[in-house]
Image (cartoon, coloured by chain):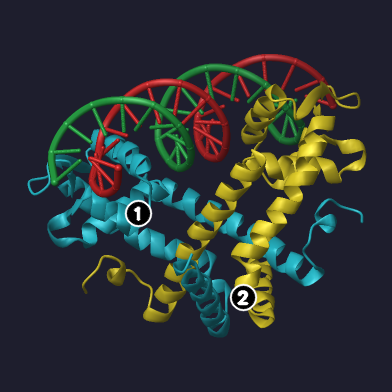
Chain colours: A yellow, B cyan, C green, D red
DNA sequence: AAAGATTGACCACTCAATCTTA
DNA sequence: TAAGATTGAGTGGTCAATCTTT
């Protein structure tokens, strides 16, 4: 029992899987984030919001829908939209159908930015993950991820 | 070409792998973080620092070494240690061998907290990841993660 | 009471600048 | 000059409280 971790109820196989996954995840996310920021000036959060809006009809989504798309909490979205509004990437209007709601719209600037960023993002994902795995490993990763995600549905 | 993502240079297989991985990672990290915070009052950052210190001889590490263990930037560590010092989890002293350096020590309180948190953390990892995968999937995840990590060494 | 959204306080992280010692 | 570390400003994220409308 040398380390704290070894006293935990994870056996060697489990510990290996968790430790390597966790390390990989941190390093990968950091690399992609730094490259995205450097090449496009967008944070991960900016990117997700703009992509969801750009994919929506007319570049418009109710905050409610947008929140569902990106799976965020209300307050996170609200703060983020406030900052992006200030930078001219999106606008916020009142919702006609439901006076409680608000509607988010991507601006022309926002659209320009996301179109460019999308390619950079894909390049980063390819460079830091996809090109480093075999086709079999890539499929295995997808299977594992889908398994975990599916298990989250019922809980 | 319906969505922005489809215009990116990722084919269907690649897109499936990235999308599922990314979704899974976000959801998994959120669940583990929320459970850790709820049950122990520690953030992920607190946990990493305390674990590294608890594993070190006498619960002491030079900031330089600690930073290497957790793979953080200087400023992130400095801010984090400042906050943890305020909460009585660690102390900070000047380094004898190198006057530029500082030495971080886990407190008795810090040690109590991390011992308990370690079990909770392992339970969360088991509950949200390990128990949801087969032994084969777990090994495959370890292989994939180690492949990516190893490829990062040379770059 | 519940749903949609916002706000404010606080913690976390990054980046660039700075300070000190090697 | 470079290495070890800190600081301050600014952005990002969470939680709890609040406000309005349904």
**Can you identify the residue that label 1 sits on?**
B48
Q: As drawn, is A111 to the left or to the right of A79?
A: right
Dot 1: few (<14), some (14–19), or many (≥20) neighbours within 10 Å?
some
**Residue A38 seen by the camera:** yes
Q: Where is residue B149 in the image (x, y as percent from the top left)?
A: 48, 69
Tell me the quarter of the picture where residue B22 sits: bottom right
| C-alpha span from label 1 to label 2 | 28 Å
B48 or B149: nearer the eye?
A: B149
Is disc 1 in contact with disc 2, using a CB cutoff of under 8 Å?
Answer: no
Taking depth in this image into account, of B55 and B65 the one nearest to the observer is: B65
Q: What element carries label 1?
A: helix
Residue annotated with mark 2 = A133
Q: In this view, does A67 lie above or below B21?
A: above
Q: In front: B71, or A140?
A: B71
Snapshot quadrant of residue C7: top right
* SS of the residue under disc 2: loop
- Relative placement, left or right, of B78 versus A74 is left
**Residue in front for this viewpoint, B65 or A69:** B65
Q: Residue at x 35, y 39 (%)?
A: B75
Q: Residue at 24% of width from left, 68% of height from top?
A: A3
Q: Can residue A100 be seen in this view?
A: no
Residue A69, x across and y down, in percent: 76, 47
Q: Residue A114: image x %, image y %?
A: 77, 42
Residue B12 drawn above or below residue A68:
below
Chain letter of disc 1?
B
């Amino acid at each position: 029992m040398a380390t704290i971790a070894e006293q935990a109820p994870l056996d060697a196989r489990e510990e290996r899987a968790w430790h390597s996954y966790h390390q990989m995840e941190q390093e990968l996310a950091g690399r992609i984030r730094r490259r995205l920021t450097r090449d496009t000036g967008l944070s991960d959060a900016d990117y997700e919001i703009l992509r969801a809006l750009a994919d929506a009809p007319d570049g418009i989504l109710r905050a409610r829908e947008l929140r569902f798309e990106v799976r965020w909490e209300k307050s996170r979205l609200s703060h983020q939209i406030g900052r992006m509004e200030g930078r001219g990437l999106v606008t916020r209007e009142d919702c006609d159908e439901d006076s409680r709601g608000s509607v988010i719209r991507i601006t022309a600037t926002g659209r320009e930015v996301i179109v460019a960023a999308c390619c950079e993002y894909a390049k980063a994902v390819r460079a830091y993950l996809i090109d480093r795995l075999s086709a079999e490993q890539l499929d295995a990763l997808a299977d594992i991820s889908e398994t975990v995600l599916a298990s989250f549905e019922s809980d």
